[in-house]
Amino acid sequence: MERYSEVHARKVIERILGVPINLHDDGSRHAMFDYIAILKDGRRAAIEVVADTNREVEELHAAVRRHGKTIKSSDLLFRWSVSVHTASRVARLRHELPPALAEIEAQVRALVPGNEIEQKFRPILSAMGIGLASITDRSPQGKGSIDVTVHEVRYGSLQPNVIAESCSALLSAASMEDVRGKLVRSGCEERHAAIVFSSHGESTAGSALARGQVPTCAPVLPDGITHLWAISTSLSEATAYWSPADGWQMFQVPFATDGFGAIGPIQLLLSSDAFRKPSNWSVTDPASGILFVAD
């Protein structure tokens, strides 16, 4: 059965290349590569998908979902929003956080919705694994609540080649020997490695990709890999594709919740705060909704 990251990568690559991407790893043999495509010029392309995820962050998201994203408390006067990081003990927050925030409410005379909590209370919250805390609204008496999210790392200035460098390092690692071997043994003319960056991973490459930063240097790919895909599952829906012939291309492939069966409104996606369109992006196929910029 295909994993989510594999389905996501298959749909994106299929849309961009414009040819069907067929499942190759059906479990009938050991160490099969994931997908195969017959390109428009008749050559074959083997595709292997790799998920670049931060296990600690993935587990934190799972813990928040498991224990509930909202904590209700009759002791709170306000609706709070807090973000937790990997040092947080999510299971204990339901019991420890409401009295701590109630104590803060009691000590602060003027709590303004939308403002972060004063600096003097940060040590208390940090000890509980809270990255940020703010008040979003005043609640009716006895109906206070806490919305829990995962603290996402935000990066400032990023080097433009972090995508190329990170992908090259990942694919050259000893742990990727199996991936390289599958592609080499495929016998296909083109051998594509597709790295899927989690929407809530703490990776600088994933952050740069989500921002649409186009690398300026070619990746250093290990023997056996001829083409590279870096695919984001963030709201930016950005994909960077490198080929020996064309170098880097940056795509945005809008998709819908029904598994890419429908294309979302392009202008809405481009105006989203999560995706700021670089000035040199252009629409190449309005019908398909694919956007790209080449180096």
Image (cartoon, helix red, strand yellow):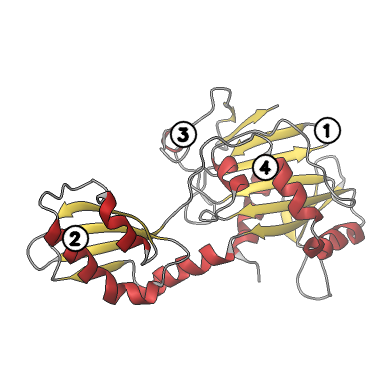
Q: Which secondary structure, mark 3? A: helix
Q: Is residue 61 left or right of residue 295?
A: left
Q: Position of residue 178 (x, y in %)?
A: 82, 65
Q: Which secondary structure, mark 2? A: helix
- In this view, the mark in front (1 or 4): 4
| CA distance separating discs 3 and 2 | 40 Å
Q: Which mark is residue 163?
A: 4
Q: Which mark is residue 245?
A: 1
**Crowding near pointer 3: few (<14 within 10 Å), some, many (20+)?**
some
Give me the residue at 15% from left, 65% from top: 76
Q: Which mark is residue 104?
A: 2
Q: Quadrant of residue 291?
A: top right
Q: The disc labelled 3 sits on which kind of residue?
A: Leu
**Crowding near pointer 4: few (<14 within 10 Å), some, many (20+)?**
many
Say whether disc 3 or disc 1 marks the residue closer to the N-terminus. Answer: 1
In the rendered image, which quarter contains the C terminus? top right
Give me the residue at 90% from left, 51% from top: 223
Q: Which mark is residue 170?
A: none
